[in-house]
Amino acid sequence: MVSRVFLVDDHEVVRVGIRELLSASEDLEVVGEASSVTEALTRIPAVAPDVAVLDVRLPDGNGIELCRELMSRLPDLKCLMLTSFTDDEALFDAIMAGAAGFVLKRIVGSDLTNAVKTVAAGQSLLDARSTAALLNRIRREREQGDPVRSLTEQERTVLDLIGEGLTNRQIADKMFLAEKTVKNYVSHLLAKLGLERRTQAAVLASKLTAPPEPREDG
């Protein structure tokens, strides 16, 4: 069975190299490429690949938020994050976005091919280091006692807009996202904050944005 792969990277040389590498494998077929988030959101749903190899840093956004958006539209899609940097923060966010794997660009060619095949088969590529980084991040946040720190930038924006009284549709329009994506953000942030209802999130958001009460002297 041939797995269909889509490449997203803003460097053409990188895309060409990966395309040639993957195309050398009989059971992998590169069905499209994009150099930005905007192009990817247009082209990937149109071809519905099995795997999307996403650069973490893109000129008009980042691959992690792109991963989250794509998976809300294509639940069966497997996303493999590709980056030049070792960044635990990005690793954590990629895991929370639903990425199946996270590999460095300096990976050996055969290892990248195997990584794509692994996620295409529905397996996770999160190694011991990835898992340890995730657990350490969760442990630090619990110790800090501030669950809001666990929210991604997009989730925090959604929380703030909930506090302003906006509906999912209004938030989707304001953030240029699909309404289903916003619903996913809301579900994730409620889970991270240990809340059950949207109204609780609205109350929390209002407290976070409220100005401090003036101190009484004397």
Image (cartoon, helix red, strand yellow):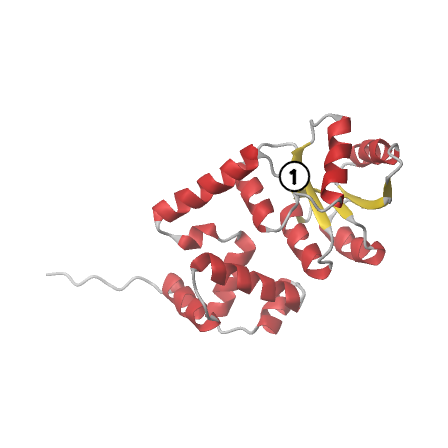
- Residue ID at (79%, 49%): 50
Seen in the picture, residue 177 relative to 104 is either above or below; the reply is below
**Farthest residue, direction left:** 218
Q: Dot 1: what SS?
A: loop
Task: Give the camera-side residue of 35 and 31.
Answer: 31
Residue 152 visible in the snapshot: yes
Location of residue 40 with respect to 53 vertically, above or below:
below
Quarter assignment of residue 47? bottom right
Instruction: Measuring from the top left, give residue 46's x and y in whole percent.
Output: 83, 58
Q: Residue at the location (50% across, 60% down)?
A: 189
**Residue 176 coordinates in the image, percent (x, y):** 66, 63
Position of residue 77 relative to residue 80, above or below, is below
Pick whichever, 43 or 99, lies toward us.
99
Question: What amino acid type is highlighted by mark number 1?
Answer: Leu
- State which quarter of the image contains the N terminus: top right
Q: Position of residue 120 (x, y in %)?
A: 76, 44
The answer to which of 101 and 170 lies nearer the viewer is 101
Please state if 197 lies on the left or on the right of 108 as rendered.
left
Q: Position of residue 109 (x, y in %)?
A: 77, 27
State the residue at coordinates (48%, 60%): 191
Specify the quadrant that holds the C terminus. Answer: bottom left
Structural crowding at the residue carrying mark 1, measured as other residues with C-alpha within 10 Å and reported as few (<14), some (14–19) or many (≥20): some
Q: Is residue 10 visible?
A: no
Name the residue tied to disc 1: 125
Residue 214 as seen in the image, left or right of residue 119: left
Quarter of the view holding residue 216: bottom left
Picture mark count: 1
